[in-house]
Image: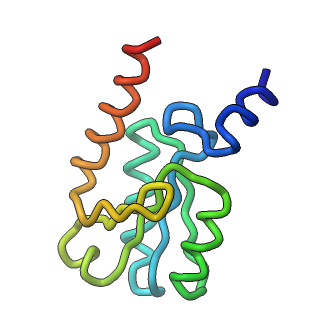
Amino acid sequence: FIGILIENYAGAMPLWLAPVQAVVMNISEGQSEYAADVVKRLKAAGFRVEADLRNEKINYKIREHSVHKLPYQIVIGEKEKAARVVAVRARGGQDLGQMSLDSLIERWRREIEAKAGSV
C-alpha cells in the first residue's frame, strides 16, 4: 500500500501524509537558537518538523531539501529573528513570504482539516 501511495504522489506527499512536513533552516549561526525554538513550537503543535542548522549556504540547504519533496521549508534569517516571524516556502519553490508562527500553524491546520473533511 505504501508503494502505491509513493507512486501516486511521485514521492511528493501532501502535508497530512508526509513523514516530515517541514524543515526549519537558519541562514547563519546567529539564528540557530530562534530556529530551534521554532522547531520546538511546531512539534508542540503536533507537526512533524526537522531542523537543519548546519553551517552551509542557504541556497545549498534549500536545493537539498527541495529534492526530498518536503511540503514546506522554513527559512530563518536576521530579519525573521528580529521580527519573530518565519519565511515560508511551499513545495515547488513557491515563496509564501513571512508570517507569524501562529499564522503558519493555523494555515497548516486548515490544510489538514480540509483533507480530513474530504475523506
Give the vertical position of 68 relative to 78 (above or below). above
Q: Position of residue 22 (x, y in %)?
A: 51, 53
Q: Residue at x 46, y 76 (%)?
A: 26
Q: Position of residue 7 (x, y in %)?
A: 75, 35
Q: Residue at x 73, y 36 (%)?
A: 6
Quadrant where the N terminus is found in the figure:
top right
Which residue is nearer to you in this view: 28 or 17? 17
Residue 45 in which image quadrant: top left
Q: Position of residue 49 (x, y in %)?
A: 52, 50
Q: Is residue 23 shown left or right of residue 99? A: right
Give the vertical position of 64 relative to 45 (above or below). below
Give the vertical position of 79 relative to 13 (above or below). below
Q: Is residue 52 shown left or right of residue 104? A: right
Q: Residue at x 49, y 55 (%)?
A: 91
Which residue is nearer to you in this view: 102 or 114? 114
Q: Residue at x 49, y 38 (%)?
A: 15
